[in-house]
């Protein structure tokens, strides 16, 4: 039986096993999928298990999406462009690093009834998933993209890759149409995002990549101000769908039942 894992730190919040095991059962695939707490000093051990064929595939979440890159043999074109890996598998004896975050985020946004073209976007955070978010936003033909990060140096590194990015100081919110939280703030219902300076929140889109809890304080504040709010559940589902297809050659069904499967967590 093949074994698959999602690795990260923290990892307790991950609903990946629930979703992937649901699809495995529905498609009569004999395999297991579990979550695994990973520490930086154990990354090489993980790859040893992959190379020994003890692990057939891995999903990678924060903070390892960049850290695993030197350990794979090849990157797919989209993973190379994003410099971010969230899906690992073996092909012809080589360990491949792939990225399904771009496609997952783009599909999720397309399913939200909001006009993205030429909209002004602020991304909070500059971590491993952010390049994937930027690529997807460019595909959707948004307008200006701004980055704000608590550590400005990390934001500056992103600007070297995406030269038309705009960098603003952390905590300075101006007039944006879409605000995307790509930080870990909110995983424990803490709140370090102040929205006091945001002009006319009504009609704007507040998007949080976090999906568990379903409404972080960031989204609750946005909802209270009259904004459209959306968590990262659909992105999570659609990036998982793409990873499942890569591993098993089957594109699993995403329907209301799939979405409701995760609602009680």
Image (cartoon, helix red, strand yellow):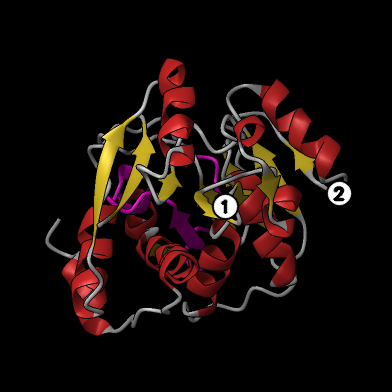
> Does residue 215 appear to the left or right of 246 in the view shown?
left
Vertical position of residue 205 compared to residue 157: above or below: below
The residue that appears at 54% across and 57% down in the rendered structure is 101
Which span is picked out in magenta?
Answer: 195-220
Residue position for label 1: 199
- At mark 2, the secondary structure is loop
Measured as percent of width and height from the top left, residue 192 is found at 41, 30
Measured as percent of width and height from the top left, residue 71 is found at 61, 32
Q: Give the total number of marks visible in the rendering.
A: 2
Residue projecting furthest to the top:
41
Callout 1: few (<14), some (14-19), or many (20+) C-alpha neighbours within 10 Å? few
Residue closer to the observer: 118 or 67: 67
- The reply to whether residue 213 is in sight is no
Residue closer to the observer: 108 or 113: 108
Residue position for label 2: 164
Quarter in which the C terminus is drawn: bottom left
């Amino acid at each position: 039986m093949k074994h698959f894992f999602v690795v990260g730190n923290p990892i307790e919040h991950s609903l990946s096993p629930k979703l992937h095991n649901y699809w495995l059962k529905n498609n009569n695939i004999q395999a297991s999928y579990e979550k695994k707490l990973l520490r930086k000093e154990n990354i090489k051990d993980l790859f040893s298990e992959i190379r020994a064929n003890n692990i057939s595939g891995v999903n990678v979440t924060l903070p390892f999406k960049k850290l695993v890159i030197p350990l794979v043999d090849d990157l797919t074109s989209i993973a190379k462009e994003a410099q971010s890996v969230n899906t690992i598998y073996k092909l012809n004896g080589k360990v491949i690093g792939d990225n399904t975050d771009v496609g997952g985020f783009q599909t999720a946004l397309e399913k939200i009834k909001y006009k993205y073209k030429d909209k002004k976007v602020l991304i909070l955070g500059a971590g491993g998933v952010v390049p994937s978010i930027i690529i997807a936003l460019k595909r959707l033909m948004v307008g200006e993209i701004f980055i704000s990060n608590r550590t400005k140096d990390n934001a500056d590194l992103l600007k070297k890759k995406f030269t038309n990015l705009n960098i603003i100081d952390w905590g300075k919110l101006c007039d944006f149409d879409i605000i995307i939280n790509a930080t870990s703030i909110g995983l424990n219902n803490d709140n370090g995002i102040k929205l006091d300076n945001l002009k006319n929140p009504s009609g704007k889109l507040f998007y949080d990549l976090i999906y568990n809890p379903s409404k972080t304080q960031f989204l609750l504040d946005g909802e209270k101000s009259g904004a459209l709010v959306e968590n990262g559940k659909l992105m999570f589902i659609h990036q998982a769908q793409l990873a499942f297809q890569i591993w098993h050659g089957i594109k699993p069904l995403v329907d209301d039942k799939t979405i409701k499967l995760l609602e009680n967590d």
